[in-house]
Image: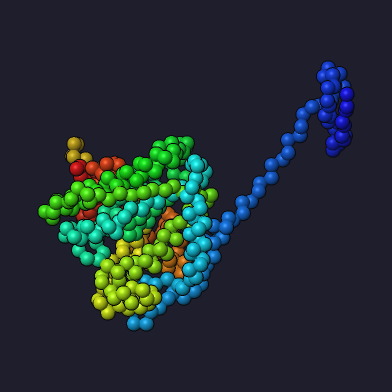
């Protein structure tokens, strides 16, 4: 039998023993309890992804916006020059977060969807005359519709879409109702998120495409079908999740001019030239300004509004509060290009009280139902907003 004894502060005996008779130990008044250490709060350190985000944000805030001689800023919004290597580092760190094995109700989540072989799809749509050369505003509006639908299905706080892709961000600390326990949609099962997300966007996009063709008297061939892939990301903080949005805004700012030149038939030497020469060619071809969604993408933020609603069954007008998806980079209260926000000292995502969250005519929507059969549209009449519900 071996007895190990030590003197604790204030002469309190504590003992550890091996094979010691318990009754005798208890009779001697010795305690077998282990002191519980005091938990000291540990301040969370910034991650490498957050540090990279901060570095880029500071750079965009401190540097002057780029200028191209001969192109007025009213024709195209340019952000501050920044090293491509910094954006490539951000990309690597962000995509490394898109391989989670499960969701955590304390972490932020992203859904990113991409069109598969979208260039081939649009080429076929041009061949049958459904869309014209260059950027298609109809396709852009369908993508914006699909993006808002995904926000509602997965309770997204922020969404951004450009070209053939969309990103949905969900912040658990801003979701759910006070007093209610929070739970991710579809019980947070990643496989369901991926399959439901890609199938919903694929279905809604193709249905809208079919309706567009029908309205123009065009029959869609059976082999023209759009489809989308989907991936889930898991981030330790809201800032990490916003890094994904910042990266996609950069991608849009760089590629929009390249795509515009390519699809508008610019000479090969222009397509292969630098950004400034492409922009000058677009100006000389009288193709500036580009469509806002093509040039800067569309960012939606979940907000809330008070509305007057006409109830047809009772013929009454009631006041209700409804969640709405607000287009915050429409240019009314800030730049359209999200990469100009640091320079303007505006947050990437507007908070309560920010004028970008005001409900402006044509800048917000309430989308209802995953099937897309019901959409509430807002109209302005006699100084107040009225909602009309349409059932498909």
Q: Residue at x 22, y 66 (%)?
A: 133
Q: In the rendering, at what x and y percent does residue 58 appear? A: 52, 67
Residue 302 visible somewhere in the drawing: no
Q: In the rendering, at what x and y percent does residue 143 appear? A: 29, 54
Q: Is residue 371 left or right of residue 130?
A: right
Q: In the rendering, at what x and y percent does residue 36 appear? A: 73, 35
Q: In the rendering, at what x and y percent does residue 315 appear? A: 18, 39
Q: Is residue 246 left or right of residue 365?
A: right
Q: Residue at x 34, y 82 (%)?
A: 70
Location of residue 344 by image quarter: bottom left
Q: Is residue 272 left or right of residue 81?
A: left
* Quadrant for the C terminus in the image: top left
Q: Residue at x 30, y 77 (%)?
A: 281
Residue nearer the viewer, 146 or 222: 222
Is residue 155 positioned above or below 280 on the image? above
Location of residue 354 by image quarter: bottom left
Q: Residue at x 49, y 45 (%)?
A: 100
Is residue 177 positioned above or below 246 on the image? above
* Quadrant for the N terminus in the image: top right
Residue nearer the viewer, 227 or 375: 227
Count of numbered labels shown in the rendering: 0
Q: Residue furthest left?
A: 217
Q: Residue furthest bottom?
A: 69
């Amino acid at each position: 039998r071996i007895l190990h004894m030590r003197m604790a502060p204030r002469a309190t005996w504590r003992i550890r023993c091996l094979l010691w008779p318990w009754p005798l130990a208890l009779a001697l008044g010795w305690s077998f309890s282990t002191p519980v250490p005091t938990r000291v709060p540990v301040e969370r350190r910034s991650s490498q992804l957050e540090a990279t985000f901060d570095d880029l944000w500071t750079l965009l805030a401190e540097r002057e916006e780029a200028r191209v001689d001969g192109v007025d800023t009213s024709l195209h919004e340019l952000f501050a020059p920044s090293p491509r290597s910094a954006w490539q580092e951000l990309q690597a760190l962000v995509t490394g977060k898109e391989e989670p094995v499960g969701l955590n109700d304390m972490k932020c989540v992203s859904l990113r969807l991409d069109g598969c072989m979208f260039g081939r799809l649009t080429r076929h749509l041009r061949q049958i005359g459904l869309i014209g050369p260059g950027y298609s505003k109809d396709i852009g509006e369908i993508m914006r519709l699909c993006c808002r639908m995904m926000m509602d299905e997965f309770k997204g706080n922020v969404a951004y879409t450009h070209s053939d892709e969309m990103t949905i961000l969900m912040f658990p600390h801003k979701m759910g109702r006070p007093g209610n326990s929070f739970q991710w949609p579809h019980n947070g099962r990643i496989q369901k998120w991926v399959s439901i997300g890609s199938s919903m966007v694929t279905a809604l996009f193709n249905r809208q495409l079919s309706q567009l063709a029908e309205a123009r008297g065009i029959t869609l061939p059976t082999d023209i079908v759009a489809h989308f892939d989907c991936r889930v990301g898991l981030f330790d903080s809201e800032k990490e999740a916003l890094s994904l949005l910042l990266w996609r805004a950069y991608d849009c700012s760089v590629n929009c001019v390249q795509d515009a030149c390519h699809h508008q038939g610019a000479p090969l030497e222009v397509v292969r030239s630098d950004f400034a020469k492409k922009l000058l060619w677009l100006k000389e071809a009288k193709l500036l300004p580009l469509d806002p969604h093509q040039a800067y993408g569309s960012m939606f933020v979940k907000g809330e509004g008070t509305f007057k609603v006409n109830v047809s069954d009772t013929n009454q007008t009631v006041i209700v509060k409804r969640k709405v998806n607000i287009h915050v980079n429409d240019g009314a209260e800030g730049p359209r290009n999200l990469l100009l926000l640091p320079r303007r000292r505006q947050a990437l995502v507007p908070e309560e009280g920010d004028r970008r969250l005001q409900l402006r005519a044509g800048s917000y929507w309430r989308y209802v139902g995953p099937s897309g059969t019901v959409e509430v549209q807002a109209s302005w009449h006699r100084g107040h907003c009225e909602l009309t519900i349409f059932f498909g």
